[in-house]
Image (tube, rainbow, N blue to C red):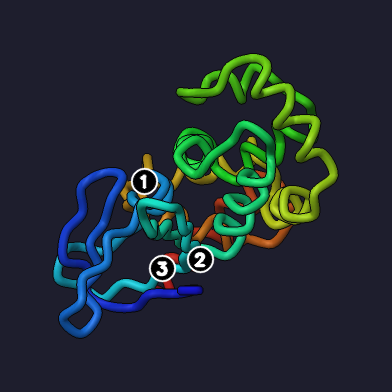
Amino acid sequence: MIGRITGTLAAKQPPQVLVDVNGVCYEIDVPMSTFYNLPGIGEKVALLTHLAIREDAHLLYGFGSEVERAAFRELLKVSGIGAKTALSVLSGLSVNDLSAAIAAQEIGRIVKVPGIGKKTAERLLLELKGKPVFAGALASVPSAGASDDVRQALLALGYNERETAATVRELPAGLAVGEAIRQALRALSRA
């Protein structure tokens, strides 16, 4: 099993990236959430991976965080969800948004993801309810709505998507939006 790849980002074309590891380039499919947080071409990159072995191919899927990879693996366990669909779900919804939708049993948020119909969304909500990876993701941020408010505020202040996403992930749970923004700004000013 290939669990992590560290190398130089050789190319990126959504949803695929090419990572050069000492002269060997790996094609890795990534969700858009990971894609947007990648460094520039020619820079060093590290991705957690999931290797899918099929009869006709060995496919690598890459993720920027362990939570994202764990969510991908849980999605694969849902009947009717393959790797491409799981990647689509994680591209359409962050793990926190997916966790919130699962906790609230909001089918409407799930069916907005391309390739997910009502029946698949219902099955997904049923089979993923109570899974630790999604319960843990919800606890790791102030709240799905609050973290989005903080992210939007930081973007409006001119911070880029990558540093904004990283800063919001590091915020402690349970903060009010105003306090979360203050702490995020403090963290960004130190960087």
The single residue placed furthest to the bottom in the displayed view is 22
Can you identify the residue that label 2 sits on?
186
Q: Residue at x 71, y 36 (%)?
A: 100
Q: Is residue 157 above or below residue 164?
A: above
Can you identify the residue that label 1 sits on?
157
Question: Split into 4 quadrants, where in the image is the C terminus?
Answer: bottom left
Position of 129 with respect to 165 (left or right) is right
Q: Is residue 168 above or below residue 109?
A: below
Q: Is residue 183 above or below residue 56?
A: below
**Mark 1 to mark 2: distance in Å?**
13 Å
State the SS at label 3. strand
Can you identify the residue that label 3 sits on?
47
Name the one closer to the observer, 121 or 153. 121
Mark 3 Cα-neighbour bin, 10 Å: few <14, some 14–19, many ≥20: many
Q: Earlier in the sequence, mark 3 or mark 1?
A: 3
Q: Earlier in the sequence, mark 1 or mark 2?
A: 1
Q: Position of residue 7 (x, y in %)?
A: 27, 78
**Residue type beneath disc 2:** Arg
